[in-house]
Amino acid sequence: RKQRLHSPPLPPPNQIPRRRPPPPPPAAMGDPQFTIGTSMSDILATMERDGHDPATISLGINAMLCFVYDYLPEPPVSLTASLSLAGASWVPDGVDRISRLPDVLLRDIISRLSAKDAARTAALSSRWPPLWRSAPLALFDINLFPDGDASPSPCAVTAAVSGALAAHPGPFRCVHLICSTMDKHRGEMARWIDILVAKGVQELVFVNRPWPIDLRLPATIFSCASLTRLYLGIWRLPDTAAVPRGVSFPNLRELGLCWNVMEDRDLAFMLERSPVLEFLGIMGSQTGVRVRLVSHSLRCVQLGFSFMEDIDVVDAPRLERLFQWETVSAVNSRAMANRSFRIKIGHAPNLRVLGYLQPGEQELVVVAGSKENIVPSVQILAMEVQFGARNAVKKVPGFLRCFPNLETLHVQSPRILEESIGKVNLKFWQEGGPIECVLRSMKKLFFYEFRGSRRELTFLKFIAERGRVLEQMVVVVASEYFSSGDNVNAKLKPLANAKWSSKACKLELFRSPFEEVSGPPYCHKIASDFGFANPFDLQYYSEAEVISLS
């Protein structure tokens, strides 16, 4: 059946792989100047005129939705569990003992069900309907339809959501609205936000199903003082210059912005008005973003697949983790003109985890208040190094000197397309004086996608021969290297035979389980989970083939 270009099928969120970040949307969706503020009819006309297949716009829209869905938080309740007690061996006499529990416990049980299942409890007995109406509710639009209806029409979704919001007096514990084409239902969208504000929603995930991709989000969202978690996807954020000065998010602890259009002042406004915000994620952006962090509450910041102008950590005394990966210089920005954008670290005395930095692609500026221009708090660092580009490699020593107390280093080696001219030997790494962290503090090195280049091997030998306290070196060899005809053992033998400074260091060699690697391995959930001390070590290689040097 031929699909309409303006209404692509909704990708099921529960079928999206989460092991590795999805790629950015296809080229048809990649140029923000081409899509922002442009109607679907104009988009299709332009593509046909330029000789592009108009059908690719559907692929682009679905890729964008998949991209956003992959970063949304999991629902706090089960959307698939059965409520049936038929055949339950632990209810032999059929007596309803659950209804005998105190009201406070029953309301807690109902609040842990989805809205559809919570409403069904009203049929149990006359005691349940008042409980349902007084329990905090969890509403998910994808769960409002029969199990067989995997792709309900957007109009049906909108009607069902309106009915559910009107039927319950609140409060709403959690609301996920991700299936509606908001442009066709702007009136309902505005009413939904008014209702959610009035009924005290605590967690809100609100995604605009395109087209358009830059629909303006109603400014009334800033009136929702009850929010503790907020995720917004594929919107143009409200003009914060017109928002009343007294508006704030006094309880907001987690903010996710996915593939939105926003001005610099919009992000600054949200940080300023969120005094207890701990987690910030910007996953994809339609326009260039200048991230300026001034917050006394932020602990973790994640920036991925975004057009960046600058990342400036001005004053973030509680910041512990700063992640950025697959970021590119914004179009028409200073960074694009210089072929790099700036990461500036000021007051961040508790910053412990940082990455993925890209020497040669990014400029690292440290203004932490010390004459040495160092960040002594960082213990775990991840870098993506183009070993084929000498200009990138020569930046690595300067980066490492900024972190004198570094204990764990992760290095991702992208595919080498063309190696630049110039030697990078052991003498190169020794120039400029000793690297403090290599000599005195580095205990672990993880090197991913080793491709057998001389520059890679020289770097590993330098760490091995200078790392006095090194305890573990893990090298994951790219799968493609095994099919190149080169002798892997012969290539790695010089590393094993190097004059290791630390005799106790353990060298571990693995074959990468991935055939193709588009970027560094990363998991946004682990990154923000402080239960994982080293969020870059995903151990995806642990079940892979072990390489033995004979």
Image (spheres, grey):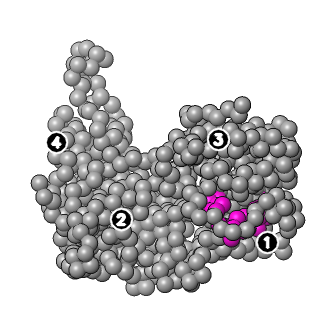
Residue 235 x %, y %: 34, 71
Question: Residue under circle 3?
Answer: 487
* Separation of marks 2 and 3 at Cα, in angstroms: 37 Å
Label 3 is placed on what type of residue? Asn
Name the residue: 32% across, 50% down: 13
Mark 2 or mark 3: name the one nearer the start of the chain. Answer: 2
Q: Is residue 2 left or right of residue 300?
A: left
- State yes or no: discs 4 and 1 in contact (Cβ < 8 Å): no
Mark 4 or mark 1: name the one nearer the start of the chain. Answer: 4
Question: Residue under circle 1?
Answer: 373
* Separation of marks 2 and 4 at Cα, in angstroms: 31 Å
Residue 141 x %, y %: 25, 53
Q: Is residue 182 left or right of residue 298?
A: left
Q: Which residues are magenta?
A: 383-405
Who is closer to the viewer here, 105 or 89?
89
Numbered disc in front, either 2 or 4: 2
Instruction: Based on the picture, tell me whether residue 393 belongs to the magenta stretch.
Output: yes
Q: Is residue 267 above or below residue 418?
A: below
Q: Give the secondary structure at mark 3.
A: loop
* Separation of marks 4 and 3 at Cα, in angstroms: 54 Å
Who is closer to the viewer here, 307 or 81?
307
Mark 1 or mark 2: name the one nearer the start of the chain. Answer: 2
Label 2 is placed on what type of residue? Pro
Question: Residue under circle 2?
Answer: 26
Outermost residue, left side = 1
* Separation of marks 1 and 2 at Cα, in angstroms: 40 Å
